[in-house]
Amino acid sequence: MDEPLESRKTPSPQGRPSETPQEDLAALHPPAVLRIALVLGAVLGAWLALEGLYARLFGHMPELSTHFELWASLLIRWQLNPANLGWPLVVVGTTWWGSLAGVWIRHRWGWPFAMVLGLVSLIFLGPSTLIAACLLAILLLPGVRAWRAVA
């Protein structure tokens, strides 16, 4: 005969039975810290992309970007134009948006890609290093990793 209605397990969105309705809800909604990571990543991505765009358009880094002096001095020593640092900034900045979108919608490539971008963003020094370190810490939290693993 049929089991009582209370003992039946409801199928989760991933196709496997879940124990409680709370598990179903947790599987559908990302953790709150992931929303914080999304905001931090969008800010970091916009910041890096706009600084890189400024460098490409005007031939020098913005006056407020004193944290790029080390990299600019190395480029000058190698007889390269410091404005060439703009393209990597634009690429890394805009790629942050795509990688965090991949994390958000649980694509398999999203989380590892965001981790690599976090490590790359650490080398830009200044406030972007602090934001990238926070993003790496959030992506390594057990709640975020568990939410990612459900996909």
Image (spheres, rainbow, N blue to C red):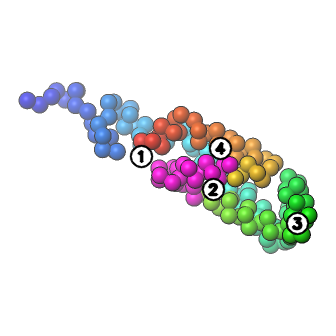
The residue nearer to you, when weighing 96 against 36, is: 96
Q: Reading the chain from its start, which is encountered first: label 2 or label 1?
A: 2
Amino acid type for the residue under numbered disc 3:
Trp
Label 1 residue SS: loop
- How far is disc 3 from disc 2 in space, using C-alphas? 29 Å
Magenta: main secondary structure equals: helix
- x, y percent for residue 128: 75, 49
Q: Which is nearer the N-term, disc 2 or disc 4?
A: 2
- Can you identify the residue that label 4 sits on? 135
Specify the label residue 66 is tagged with: none
Residue at 54% x, 49% y is 111
- Provide the residue designation for mark 1: 151
Q: Residues within 10 Å of mark 4 (few under 14, many from 20)?
A: many
Q: Magenta region: which residues?
A: 98-119
Kind of residue sitting beneath label 1? Ala
| Residue 130 % position (x, y) | 75, 43
Residue identified by numbered label 3: 78
Of labels 4 and 3, earlier in sequence is: 3
